[in-house]
Image (spheres, helix red, strand yellow):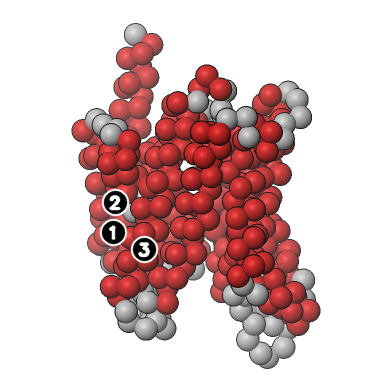
Amino acid sequence: MLVVCVAGIYGSFLSWSYLQEKISSKNYSSEDDEAYFKAPLIINSVQAFFAMLVGTAYMSVKSRRLEIPAYFLFQDKKMLWNFVLIALSQAVSSPIAYQSLNHLDYLFYLLAKSCKLIPVMLVHRLLYGSKFATYKYVVAGLVTFGVVVFSISNKAKATSNDGRILLGFAYLFVSLLLDGLTNSTQDQLFSKSQSKNITGAHLMAGLNLLNAVFTFSYTVLFTRQFDYFRQFVVDNGPEVVQDILMFGLLGSLGQIFIFLTLENFGSLLLVTITVTRKMFSMCLSVFLFGHQLNASQWFGLLTVFVGIFLESFYKMFAHQKKID
């Protein structure tokens, strides 16, 4: 099961990350002008809508009957509150993180968003009183340290930002805490709702329903991104629409494997997989575009793989112990 989940996450999100980079960096102009797509909330809305549809189908297949996300959400007020809390933290975290790019280089953004293991454990500990085995702290430290070394060893290109570093760090800090709240609350929801048969499929469908409602409502009421999107397509053609739709589909398929991993193995292992997937995306970019890794980057990469091996070793050891 773990191998299938890892392969599904890697396969879906390596393609997804390619489209993410393409949408954010491609010049869609058919003429000599510049036309870069700058409406992230449109992308988030499409992603949430697709994930809701795929999650509903996934939930219906697992239960062998037609399931409606809103139906099980409103059966239990406490459960609904937990779903709303997670969906809000997801919906708010992304725009706050993007806001930090006005004040920080992209390197710092990528670095901070890649180091989710520690805030997840911090929120688990402070908010829910969870305790972890010593090896989990070692794994979190190794993976985070490896990502840090790999990222800061890469020479960053000059970027345009206002240099207000402290404000940028504040945005990122809040975003990471929200990410930690999301992952830890998902764990608690699973552990306390097993009698209610809450599965990864329920979580995927319910969260993305709420996420789509929140993101779409905010985009319509407080931004003009839909007007921008419509005019962008009129001026530059439908290619960006095709890319966004494929981006949403791949992300939705990837979420199935994410919630399977979360349901069966917990948020810490999930974060380890997703962080290392980002590392493989970076390595793939290096080999595809002929970049060369320096000694420090190879050291960082090796450190991450040591952390992965340690996590896998202890998981297999614990599983073998249960069998014996």
- In the rendered structure, the answer to whether residue 13 lies left or right of residue 247 reads left
The residue positioned 54% from the left and 58% from the top of the image is 17
Quarter of the figure that contains the C terminus: top left
CA distance separating discs 2 and 3: 16 Å
Earlier-in-chain disc, 2 versus 3: 2
Q: CA distance from mark 1 to mark 3?
A: 15 Å
Q: Which mark is residue 238?
A: none
Q: Residues within 10 Å of mark 3 (few under 14, many from 20)?
A: many
Q: Do the residues under discs 2 and 1 have CB atoms within 8 angstroms?
A: yes
Point out residue 193 in the picture as x, y percentages from the top left corner: 50, 26
Instruction: Name the mark nearer the viewer: 1 or 3.
Output: 3
Q: Which mark is residue 172?
A: 3
The residue sitting at 49% across, 58% down in the picture is: 92
Residue closest to the eye, 320 or 182: 182
Image coordinates of residue 62 in percent, x first then y, are: 67, 26
Q: Position of 228 compared to 299: left or right?
A: right
Q: Residues within 10 Å of mark 1 (few under 14, many from 20)?
A: many
Relative height, residue 198 to residue 319 (above, below):
below
Mark 1 = which residue? 148
The secondary structure type at the circle numbered 1 is: helix
Considering the numbered disc 3 on the image, is that residue within a helix, a strand or a loop?
helix
